[in-house]
Image (tube, grey):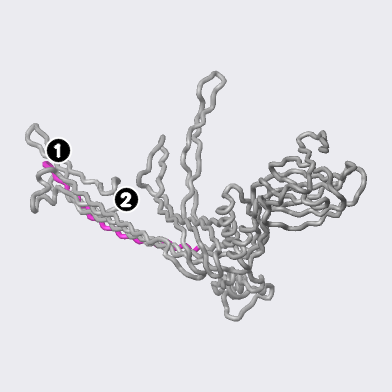
């Protein structure tokens, strides 16, 4: 006789032990020693994979079985006190066993998960020394445990994402000891400039009776669109009436600018660090005007924002294996320039010359890399004169001016990463170690500004810092 139970969203089954053959090929045995008793029993959690089965041994004969969702898991009875639970699809359901008197024998909360044994085996082969646990939650995969380096955690996450799907993996693996990376950067720049001008300015005042002829030939410095700041001029006048004035302009200027910066930054593997050495200059961004009580516009004040310039460095290191570092570096060298500057209501706004380099490389600890070798050469020439006459072989030199500008800039950035470890404070030294200010008699009589500074073997009694600065590199 089949007994129907009234239960919402639950299927009631009466199982004949002589039928329902076992179709599962993989079995794991779990013994359920459910004590007989009256009342509702607490359901026991039970996890199994899709297509896997578990054997349940019961203390009494089974009469009825309740399966909340047969699409998730099913129960098969082959003997009076033994049941087989088979996982069909990912999800959760409940299975309850009853005896002939209607008393509950045992209840199970079934969680059918994805079969993760293949993923566990693959992770064990890929990272044999890592302690990684793989758990399932519904259709998702959760990775926990500890690894030695961030690259191992990333490799485990990539493998799980390939096998289970990128959107179904939660990587919660912790790194045991995160390495620190110190980046030593050398920014060296040499800028050379050469400016030349040779020309003659002529002015004449010629009178012929009642007619007056005035001649003026002025040659500005037009190679860089602005007059020279300084120069050499030789002026000669001939006669009174008529009069001729000749001004010889001859100038040559050469300059060299050398820029050197050596910023050192330290960051944890996988984190970013930023360095900036420079300044800020104001630029107008708008105008704010006050409104009078009568509704008219009153005094207006320009609003100002500040733009950064100088030498900046940003890098993100990732320690791959022992002694090898993946490095993403971005460096920028900018300076304020009068080229392409604009004038807004009498306020001169300069421009910025920027040179930027960004790359990702893999180099060993202590290995150097030329980040960027940038060479820029700019040459300008201009000839001004009176058309026709300025092309004469000899006389034309009196009516023309030649301007010449040559600017050369060479920039190089050297990058050296180190895997570092912290040191004790007493093993460090400061720049002011060994410095002692001079007393007034020493400063007045002997012209000394300090008594002791940088003496080998000297140690300030109040300090015990000595050795190298910063970190000790491996």
170 above or below 303?
Answer: below
269 above or below 199?
Answer: below
77 above or below 329?
Answer: above
Quadrant of the rendering where the N terminus is positioned: top right
Position in image of residue 20 (x %, y %)? 73, 47
Q: Which residues are magenta?
A: 240-262
Q: Nearer the viewer, residue 149 or 93?
A: 93
What residue do we see at 88% from left, 43% from top? 100
Task: Give the number of the mark in front: 2 or 1.
Answer: 2
Q: Main secondary structure of the magenta part?
A: strand
What residue do we see at 12% from left, 46% from top? 239
Q: Nearer the viewer, residue 351 or 26?
A: 26
- Left or right for 2, reference 458: right
Position in image of residue 35 (x %, y %)? 90, 51
Quarter holding residue 101:
top right
In this view, the residue farthest toward the top is 294
Quarter holding residue 347:
top left
Q: Is residue 327 visible?
A: yes
Residue 272 drawn in magenta: no
Q: Which mark is residue 375?
A: none
Badge 1 density bin: few <14, some 14–19, many ≥20, Cα 10 Å = few
Q: Nearer the viewer, residue 287 or 114?
A: 114
User: SS class of the residue under badge 1?
Assistant: strand
Quarter holding residue 437:
bottom right
Q: Nearer the viewer, residue 299 or 440?
A: 299
- Residue bearing mark 1: 214
What residue do we see at 42% from left, 50% from top? 336
In this view, the residue farthest toward the left is 209
- Left or right for 397, reference 54: left
Q: Which mark is residue 229?
A: 2
Q: CA distance from mark 2 to mark 1?
A: 28 Å
């Amino acid at each position: 006789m089949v007994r129907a139970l009234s239960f919402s969203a639950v299927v009631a089954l009466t199982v004949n032990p002589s039928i329902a053959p076992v179709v599962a090929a993989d079995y794991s045995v779990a013994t359920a020693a459910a004590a007989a008793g009256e009342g509702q029993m607490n359901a026991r959690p039970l996890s199994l994979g899709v297509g896997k089965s578990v054997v349940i041994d019961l203390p009494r004969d089974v009469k009825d079985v309740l399966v909340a969702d047969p699409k998730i898991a099913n129960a098969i009875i082959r003997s009076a006190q033994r049941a087989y639970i088979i996982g069909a699809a990912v999800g959760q359901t409940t299975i309850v066993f009853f005896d002939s008197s209607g008393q509950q024998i045992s209840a199970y909360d079934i969680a059918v998960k994805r079969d993760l044994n293949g993923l566990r085996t693959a992770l064990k082969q890929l990272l044999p020394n890592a302690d990684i646990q793989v758990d399932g939650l519904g259709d998702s995969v959760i990775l926990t445990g500890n690894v030695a380096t961030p690259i191992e955690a990333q490799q485990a996450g990539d493998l799980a994402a390939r096998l289970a799907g990128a959107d179904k993996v939660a990587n919660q693996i912790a790194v045991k000891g995160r390495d620190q990376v110190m980046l030593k950067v050398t920014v060296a720049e040499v800028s050379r400039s050469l400016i030349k001008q040779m020309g003659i300015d002529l002015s004449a005042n010629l009178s012929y009776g009642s007619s007056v002829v005035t001649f003026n030939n002025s040659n500005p410095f037009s190679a860089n669109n602005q007059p020279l700041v300084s120069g050499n001029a030789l002026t000669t006048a001939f006669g009174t009436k008529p009069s001729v004035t000749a001004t010889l302009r001859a100038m040559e200027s050469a300059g060299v600018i050398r820029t050197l910066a050596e910023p050192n930054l330290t960051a944890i593997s996988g984190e970013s660090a930023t360095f900036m050495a420079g300044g800020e200059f104001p630029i107008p961004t708008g105008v704010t005007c006050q409104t009078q009580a009568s509704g008219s516009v009153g005094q207006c004040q320009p609003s100002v924002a500040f733009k950064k310039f100088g030498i900046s460095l940003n890098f993100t290191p990732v320690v791959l294996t022992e002694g090898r570092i993946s490095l993403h570096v971005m460096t920028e060298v900018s300076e304020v320039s009068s080229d392409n500057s604009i004038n807004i209501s009498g306020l001169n706004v300069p421009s910025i010359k920027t040179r930027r380099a960004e790359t990702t490389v893999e180099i060993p600890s202590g290995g150097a890399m030329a980040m960027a070798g940038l060479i820029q050469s700019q040459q300008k020439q201009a000839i001004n004169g009176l058309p026709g006459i300025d092309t004469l072989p000899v006389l034309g030199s009196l009516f023309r001016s030649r301007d010449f500008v040559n600017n050369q800039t060479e920039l190089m950035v050297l990058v050296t990463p180190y895997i570092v470890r912290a040191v004790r404070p007493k093993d460090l030294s400061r720049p002011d170690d060994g410095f002692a200010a001079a007393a007034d008699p020493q400063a007045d009589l002997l012209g000394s500004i300090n008594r002791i500074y940088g003496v080998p073997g000297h140690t300030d009694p109040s300090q015990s810092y000595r050795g190298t600065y910063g970190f000790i590199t491996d």
